[in-house]
């Protein structure tokens, strides 16, 4: 594919990738049981506060970029939050407020909240939408409220969501570039929506008459909006380079969604915005270089020993600068024309480009900060494992021989021993005598002391002569 074709193709793709913040929310009778299986279903047990991430137009939760976006947000959120990906890749070229998308998203959010409540949480769910995903969340909030579950959402953050449309919406230039993209691809990439589709039409602003406005979120749900502003600075050898043309060229926000639209929640729906619900809005500035230096270096790389070739590259750079002056006039007027293609292509390489926002560190950190302001982290306590039943106490040991009495004194322990001794077997008697010998620390540790003890006990129990017997046992 030629460089020109690549430029047009990327601009077409970029211009039509995501969508706006308005769309149909009328009831349609779509049943949630008809929702396709999710690529990442809600876990059976949700022990941390759910954060449902909704991707944008033409994307899918199964995309590598969205997997990285989920991990980046989870890291920024920290413990106590569980980031989940809602997938509508099966309908991502449709308007996100379409009935089947908003109905399936509502079911997903409710499932996450109920699983969280079952684990001991408060059942409230945070949501973040990139681009058209923000449109889907707003439309879904209307369904939840109609079902009496308007408090299910704890808060919403939108990232590059065109709340007040995009200059690409329904424009002839966008349609022309779309056709170019169709000509350049091999038909295997179904991510360019057809001309006249609801997604393309409703991306326009002011909102076309055939598109119903997405309402504001319920008064109990706070929202924060984030957008970016890419500015291309003409530089030659790291110095401003204009030749009479403007040095700094502001693109339409992230090249797809102007910053005033990304932060245009207030005024994006009929009526007045519920007071106090818009808690934050931020535009992240993203200055980028124009790349004229790269053009000169390209000429030098072809023949580094040929100053004439480097001079020729510089000559070809000058018309490019002048052409940018015309493109600047179009952008200031809010129009997109083919003359803007090179600038928009340069903008698509920015970290702040529309499609890069979910993985742009500054935007991710800001989104996490806003989400954490809306709802505190929560981690369910680990289940307590019951202690095993206490072991039965060991059987009482046979009474031991009490300390020896002074010579000539009665030893009551010997009488007690005699009362139980008669009922013992020979082995039991032997064990008792061994214990008595040990407790009295008899010096003779050989077999003779056991025999002596056995004889003494037998003799005592036969003669009932306590004084004599005690003396024999005590002295061994």
Image (cartoon, rainbow, N blue to C red):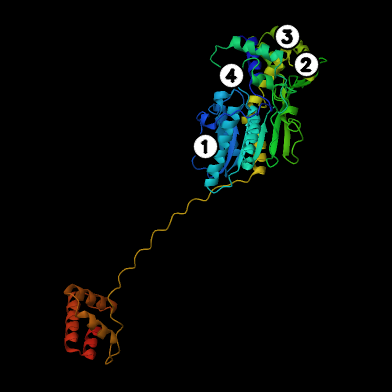
Image-based side of 391 in relation to 28, left or right = left
Residue under label 1, please give it.
42
Measured in 3D between alpha carbons, the distance from the residue under mark 1 to the one under mark 2, in whole angstroms, is: 46 Å
**CB under 8 Å between callouts 1 and 4?**
no
Neighbour class for label 4 at 10 Å: few (<14), some, many (≥20)? Answer: some
Image-based side of 416 in relation to 7, left or right = left
Earlier along the polypeptide chain: callout 2 or callout 4? 4
299 or 235, which is in the foreground? 235
124 or 468, which is in the foreground? 124
| Residue drawn at point x = 25 percent, y = 86 percent | 415
Residue under label 4, please give it.
191
Measured in 3D between alpha carbons, the distance from the residue under mark 3 to the one under mark 1, in whole angstroms, is: 56 Å
Residue under label 2, please give it.
330
**CB under 8 Å between callouts 2 and 4?**
no
Residue 390, horizontal then vertical, whole percent: 38, 63
Q: Quadrant of residue 407?
A: bottom left
Mark 1 falls on what kind of element?
Answer: loop
Earlier along the polypeptide chain: callout 1 or callout 4? 1
Measured in 3D between alpha carbons, the distance from the residue under mark 2 to the one under mark 3, in whole angstroms, is: 22 Å
Earlier along the polypeptide chain: callout 3 or callout 1? 1
Which quarter of the image is occupied by the C terminus? Answer: bottom left
């Amino acid at each position: 594919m030629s460089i020109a074709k690549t430029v047009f193709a990327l601009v077409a793709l970029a211009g039509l990738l995501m969508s706006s913040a308005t769309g149909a929310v009328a009831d349609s009778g779509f049943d949630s049981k008809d929702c396709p299986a999710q690529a990442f279903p809600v876990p059976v047990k949700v022990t941390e506060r759910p954060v449902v991430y909704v991707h944008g137009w033409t994307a899918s939760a199964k995309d590598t970029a969205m997997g990285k976006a989920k991990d980046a947000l989870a890291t920024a959120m920290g413990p106590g939050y569980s980031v989940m990906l809602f997938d509508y890749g099966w309908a991502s070229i449709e308007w996100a407020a379409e009935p089947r998308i908003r109905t399936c998203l509502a079911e997903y959010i409710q499932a996450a909240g109920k699983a969280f409540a079952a684990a001991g949480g408060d059942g409230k769910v945070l949501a973040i939408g990139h681009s058209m995903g923000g449109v889907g969340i707003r439309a879904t909030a209307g369904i939840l409220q109609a079902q009496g579950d308007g408090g299910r959402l704890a808060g919403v953050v939108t990232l590059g969501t065109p709340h007040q449309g995009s200059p690409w919406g329904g424009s002839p230039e966008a349609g022309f570039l779309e056709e170019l993209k169709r000509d350049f691809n091999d038909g295997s990439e179904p991510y360019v929506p057809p001309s006249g589709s609801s997604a393309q039409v409703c991306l326009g602003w002011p909102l076309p008459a055939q598109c119903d406005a997405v309402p504001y979120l319920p008064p109990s749900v706070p929202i924060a909006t984030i957008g970016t502003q890419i500015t291309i600075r003409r530089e030659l050898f790291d110095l401003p380079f204009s030749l009479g043309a403007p040095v700094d060229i502001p693109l339409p926000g992230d090249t797809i969604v102007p910053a005033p639209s990304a932060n245009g929640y207030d005024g994006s729906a009929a009526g007045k915005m519920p007071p106090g619900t818009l808690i934050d809005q931020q535009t992240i500035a993203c200055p980028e270089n124009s790349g004229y230096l790269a053009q000169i270096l390209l000429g030098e790389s072809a023949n580094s020993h040929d100053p004439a070739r480097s001079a020729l590259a510089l000559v070809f750079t000058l018309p490019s600068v002048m052409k940018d002056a015309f493109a600047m006039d179009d952008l200031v007027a809010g129009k997109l024309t083919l003359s803007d293609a090179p600038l928009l292509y340069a903008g698509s390489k920015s970290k702040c480009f529309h499609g890069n926002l979910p993985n742009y560190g500054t935007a991710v950190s800001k989104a996490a900060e806003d989400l954490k302001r809306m709802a505190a982290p929560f981690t369910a306590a680990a289940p307590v494992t019951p202690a095993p039943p206490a072991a039965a106490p060991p059987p009482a040991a046979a009474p031991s021989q009490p300390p020896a009495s002074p010579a000539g004194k009665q030893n009551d322990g010997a009488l007690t021993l005699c009362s139980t001794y008669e009922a013992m077997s020979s082995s039991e008697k032997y064990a008792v005598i061994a214990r008595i010998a040990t407790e009295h620390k008899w010096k003779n540790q050989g077999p003779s002391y056991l025999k002596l003890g056995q004889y003494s006990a037998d003799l005592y129990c036969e003669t009932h002569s306590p004084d004599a017997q005690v003396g024999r046992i005590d002295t061994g």
